[in-house]
Amino acid sequence: MDIRLPIEDAKALVASALTASGVSDDNAASVARALVAAEVDGQGGHGFARVSSYCAQARSGKVAGHAVPTITQRGPAMLHVDAGTGFAYPALDLAIDKLVPLARETGIAAAAISASHHAGQMGAHVERIAREGLIALMLANTPAAMAPWGGNKALFGTNPIAFAAPRQNDPLVIDLSLSRAARGKIMAASKRGEPIPEGWALDHDGQPTTDAKAALGGMMIPMGDAKGAALALMVEILAASLTGANYSYEASSFFDGDGPAPQVGQTLIAIDPARGGSTDFGLRLEALIGEIEAQSGARLPGTRRIAARAKAQSEGVAVPARLMEEIEAATRS
């Protein structure tokens, strides 16, 4: 049974679990905002299901709970953020705060983040940039979960990509994993004791499975088969080779407190649409969106999150009872 909490109460609950696990107040607030926002948007795999594992990692020192990210400008339009083996969200907050004015000044700017951790619901990060009137693209690598096409050993992460473009009201947001399903969805299913759909994953022996736990110990199937694996390689280069972060096959799990810090990477790119060749970007974008919406049955990416937010604002955010028990136990640790 779900327990509904006002959004601010949910943030306070998550933050208290993190601070009890050795996370600084500022970092706990940043992480709590991100996890609750994911849950509000209907992205449960990046929400409350992560709290107990985040707390375990903070307690073991796998994540530096008191890390303070640092930023260096490496060129006229290039930033480097060292997350200090802490949570990704404070590093992303810092990167976005500096990236937005730099992109306005230069027309296009990028931030490369290293020594980082799970970036969660990436659509939320690019949406923040788009709400400032900029186009945003984000790429991140994650612990190894997919083999190169034709291979038999996990080498790439699910390596998500997110994109956002400004509109008059809510930005257009596209957020996708390069596996057929986000690994966070499989983790959430495992916690609920539920099966996963066929075609999402393989077990340790490379056999198709609907068992969520077996899938977590096996490999994800890339979206689009060989094409998805090629895109995962592209993300690996932009999120790890470029930033100086660990490759996916070098990174430890996001799901437990064992082993060294994952030290993965993220790259954010912000573009001022007024600096491109179009003098009416907003009108051109609306024309394209209008053509999509004119087709019966067509759905614009990201529209479900708007409805989910409205429901959470009026009814509160739903916390599954089992996860509530986990979070409350963490506050007492």
Image (cartoon, helix red, strand yellow):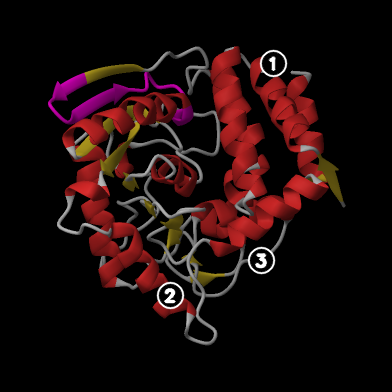
Find the distance from the CA under tag 2 to the CA under tag 3: 38 Å
Q: Which residue is mark 3?
A: 195
Amino acid beneath label 3:
Pro
The mark nearer the N terminus, 1 or 2, is 1
Q: Please state the horizontal and vertical placement of residue 98, each as a whole percent of the image.
A: 32, 25
- Looking at the picture, does residue 110 appear above or below residue 173? above
Amino acid beneath label 2:
Gly
Q: Please state the horizontal and vertical placement of residue 17, each as a whole percent of the image.
A: 70, 23
Find the distance from the CA under tag 1 to the CA under tag 2: 49 Å
Q: Residues within 10 Å of mark 3 (few under 14, many from 20)?
A: some
Q: Left or right: where does residue 185 sit relative to residue 252?
A: right
Question: Is 75 colored magenta in this rendering?
Answer: yes
On residue 101, the disc is: none
Task: Single out the mark in the foreground, 2 or 3.
Answer: 2
The quarter of the displayed image where residue 328 is located: top right
Q: Which residue is mark 2?
A: 290
Q: Which residues are magenta?
A: 73-89
- Looking at the picture, does residue 264 appear above or below residue 25? below
Amino acid beneath label 1:
Ala
Q: Residues within 10 Å of mark 2 (few under 14, many from 20)?
A: few
Whether residue 148 appears in this view of the structure is no
On residue 20, the disc is: 1
Identify the secondary structure beneath mark 1. Answer: helix
Quadrant placement of the C terminus = top right
Task: Single out the mark in the foreground, 1 or 3.
Answer: 1
Question: Is 30 colored magenta in this rendering?
Answer: no
Q: Residue at x 45, y 14 (%)?
A: 67
